[in-house]
Amino acid sequence: MHAETTEPAKRRPSGAATRARILTAANELFYAQGIRATSADRIIEQVGVTKVTFYRHFRTKGDLVVAYLEEQAAAERRWLAGARREGDPAGSLRALATDIGAASCSPGFRGCAFINAAAEFSDPEDPVRAAVDAHRAWMLGEFADIAAQAGVRDVDAVARQLMILRDGAMVNGYLGEAETVADSLAAAFTSILAAPGGASPR
């Protein structure tokens, strides 16, 4: 008599793991191909889940877009926290410039995910645009904090100028080399702090 053999039951991915897989695919496709150009069906196909499973985690594509941007925002917060040099505003800006130069010239770079999203979602009432605005307000606040540490006279104006330089460098990365972008951005950051409306960096 042969002993019965049973194969171990295959474990189904947990809800959290499935959600993470959907977000991973969304991150890749939204960033590389554009948000509106990427359908929910395309993401469902890449992940290999049913529509029921997809919509169990994200009721609408808009919910997924917001979750995608929240992940992008969390990554940028971690990056900026690691680049900041507490008590050394000029050092913080140099580190940011180096990292932005490297990122903007890397293969697959398609610009700032938030600027890209804002270009696709112009309605200020759209939850996607709200997520973009919230993150950019946070980043502007970080630049304001750096400007305040540098002792500038008009913190808000300098923060806005630093933000504009950051945005421009992200676009310029398509056309330049990482070192050139980083050096130019660092010099521009420093000149803003040393301008008549600011103060010499400490």
Image (cartoon, rainbow, N blue to C red):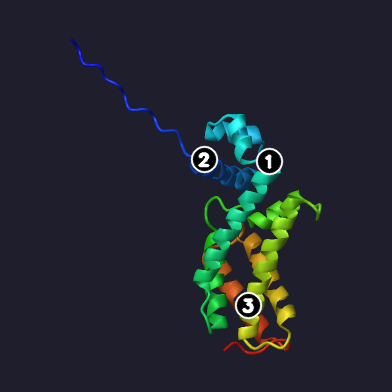
| Residue 142 screen position, x and y as percent | 63, 73
> Disc 1 and disc 3: Cα gap in Å?
38 Å
Q: Answer with left or right where residue 10 lies relative to residue 198.
A: left
- Quadrant placement of the C terminus: bottom right
Q: Answer with left or right where residue 23 lies relative to residue 134.
A: left
What residue is rendered at 65% in x and 68% in y? 139
Q: Foreground residue, 13 or 110?
A: 13
Query: Where, by quadrant of the figure, is residue 113 drawn?
Result: bottom right
Label whose residue precedes the other's in the sequence (1 or 3): 1
| Residue 42 screen position, x and y as percent | 62, 34
Q: Which residue is mark 1?
A: 61
162 relative to 170, above or below: below
Query: Where, by quadrant of the figure, is residue 2 drawn?
Result: top left
For label 2, the SS is helix
What residue is rendered at 47% in x and 39% in y? 14
- Identify the mark at residue 15; answer none if there is no mark: 2
Using a 10 Å C-alpha cutoff, classify the residue at mark 2 as few (fewer than 14 neighbours), some (14 to 19) or many (20 or more). Answer: few
Residue 104 seen from this side: no
Q: Foreground residue, 126 or 109?
A: 126
Label whose residue precedes the other's in the sequence (1 or 2): 2
- Identify the mark at residue 169; answer none if there is no mark: none
For label 1, the SS is helix
143 relative to 39, above or below: below
